[in-house]
Amino acid sequence: MLAVARRRPRRVVELVRPYVDTTPQWGQRLLSLIEWALTPDLVDLAVDLIENGHADEARGPIAVNSDFWSLLYGLAETAPAPAARLVGAYLRRHLARARADGSGDPFASKHLSTHSQVAGTVLSRIAKAEPEAYVEQVLPFVIDVATAGSTDRTDAYAPAGRWGYRHVSGHSVDTALLAALDTALRSLAASYPAAAAGALQHLAASPVQELRFLACRAYTVIGQADEAISWLLTDERNLRLGWLDSPRWASRGLIETATPHCSDETLERLTVVLLGHYTAWERRRQKGQRSAWGWAQYELLSAISPDRRSDVVSRRLAEWERKFFGQLPSPPTAIQAEFVGSPISDHAAQRMTDVQWHRALDKYAKPRPERFWPPQGGVYELAQTLRSRAEQEPDRFTEFAFSLGSGSPAAYLCAIVEAVTPHLDADRWEQLALHAHRTLGPAAAPTICRALQSAPQNFTAASLSALDSYTTDPHPEQDIRDADAEGTRTDLLTAGMNATRGQAALTVATLLSHGSEHLHALTPLVTRLANDPVLAVRVCAAQAVLALMKHDPQIALDTAEQLLNHQDANVYNASTTQRLLINTLVREPSRFAAHLARALLEPGDAAELAGQSWAVATIQGCLTPELPNSTHELNTFARRGAAAVFANNIDHYPHLVPLFTDDDTDVRKNASQGMRQAFNLLPAQADELVSAFLDSDAFPDHLEHLAFALYDHTGPLPAVAINACERIVQHAGRDLGDLRTHRAADGHHLVSAVLRLYRQSPQPQRIRCLDIIDRLSQVGAYGLHAALENER
């Protein structure tokens, strides 16, 4: 039917119209017809389907990220007038849905999405090619939404609502909708003023700011100068119509185009109003701010045609030009994003002497007035340039670093230390690090710690005093935030990494991992950090205790117990303490089982990590009697963690089977990941696991893992594979051929698996394989035809 619809659309419409509003199955067929075979002759049918609610989810037929606007992409170019009808029907339908839910704005109520990759192009094409049709279909929607957005305002004309704050070249659907309407109205007003008269009359009389903005834009091109200026002067607020970054530009544009042609009387009225125009904002000058008095008047007066300016206007403009020297009224610009760069270019930095560097560093160390555009950086950005040069000339800038004192921002000296560390021997690095430590104090701690973590061979006994001082630094005084109901695994570790004592702990861990040369000096630091009152520091210290385990297991175990004996159970809520707990459980299960039992009772992420630890202990065979001995004894969060571990250790698949039917969706999701390794088992074990998965609650939502395993396995597939293929086709159905869904990839995987099964199977199973291939052909499985051609 789809192929015929492209060749004989009118005949297809005659045949299918009786089935509109009959059954859900026919509703889906008609929707597919519109999505895959939309032509101008199908637009009437499509409009009916949209208006009757049968195409609320209509979208382009190919891409995963397609939407309704994708459906119109080609039609907007080849048949813009019918495309405009579809736009109008779609907007009206979703406005009706929003109103039914108590909202006058379908974008705000989420019935319409503001995100689309092609809406701007589609709407712009229609507005330019068929402005009258676009205005007819879209203007009522914009009026209704804008008016609804003004109902809660004490001043309906105040900027607010859907289009109250406007940008040019915005990419959202609502922005594109208004921009295209502006284009269509101006085109219509310029070419067919009579056709635009009705719309302009409605907009000009509206109290809503967004609609009067459209009126202003249309008056600018309609060619009726006296009428346009008379309308502008009906309300002082008409003098502030424009965009967010140029709020009077539309008003200014009207004045600029109308004043060369308006009557002397009208011009005199305009001049009198503008000479007395000062905004309330200009009157509210704050102490210390530059006065903006007269700027609004300057913007509007300067738009009057130069050859029609009176002497009074010319003198006033000269006054404002002296006050706002170098500043000119500017049009709105598109939103821009740009990196804040260094105040000194790389090219210039390559040629600077040490004296010039000192001048530059001193100059930009002082606060400077903010530059609006282009943005220019200060201390931090200049430090990055300094770092880049230090990487190129490490010897020169190492020497230069010793000339930087405590009066310079810390970023400068730290940038040099970070840059030259890989290039220095231990003695020279020690001199530089100690200079940074003495000069900057605690501010140098993060840099020195990170440098030691990247080059632990540079650590010397002389550096110990600096590292020791960092382990007693007052930062942090307390945890950054309290644990919430879901736990704070990431927050704790991140907070520790951004604290001086936390960085010191990670540095000690790196040094101990590097070797035992400084074991005697570093062990007291490990003990101190493991007993830190702040959890964020303790979770970093867990890494150091693990490193100590390689050199002195007994002291490390004692220190681990001290670290884990914190009154707050969130001490278990970090990957570092999880690894430490697993290590201690394997070494002395009876001593540390109580910690695992405590962690398993916690909610959220802490319990999920504990569930992972429990699964590892199960695999290692170190569970003690007081610990749960099966997954059904764990809470939901712990089962999620256990499922993830067992899924990655498929040899222990018997633990996965009950998790396939778990009440929790996330447990089933995590357990299903194990199916990707199912065929790494012995054939009998694979048959058992796959059969259990096919009969479980996890299969419908996560069959993609089994499909991938069938595709990825390189050896002969076990007997259960054909059952798996049949069940996947039966459940996924048409989605296997729908490129908009992830099931299309499953269809591709299935094609490969079925053809391999056909080649390796005896005749009875080959018949079953052919039945599966027939079904895959019916749903249009991706890659089937190419695969069959290769078979021939």
Image (cartoon, rainbow, N blue to C red):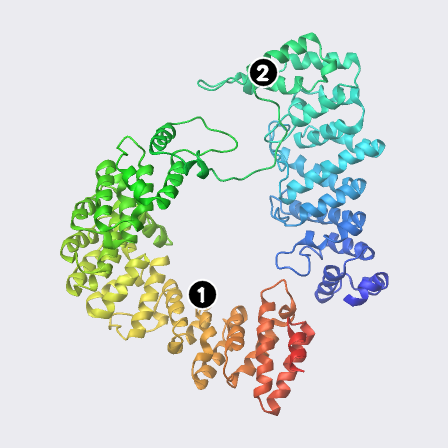
**Which residue matches tag 1?**
664
Calculate the distance from the C-alpha at mark 2 to the C-alpha at mark 1: 66 Å
Q: Earlier in the sequence, mark 2 or mark 1?
A: 2
Can residue 777 be seen from the camera position used here? yes
Q: 120 or 433, which is in the foreground? A: 433
**Residue at (76%, 23%) from the top-left corner?**
228
Image vertical order of residue 19 relative to residue 426, above or below: below
Quadrant the C terminus occupies: bottom right
Tell me: 33 left or right of 745: right
Binning the other alpha carbons within 10 Å of mark 1 as few (below 14), some (14 to 19) or many (20 upward) gives: some
Tell me: 229 left or right of 450: right
Give the amino acid type for the residue marked by disc 2 in the picture. Answer: Gly
Give the amino acid type for the residue marked by disc 1 in the picture. Answer: Asp
Tell me: 267 left or right of 563: right
Image location (x, y in percent) of residue 415: 34, 41
The secondary structure type at the circle numbered 1 is loop
Residue 220: quarter of image: top right
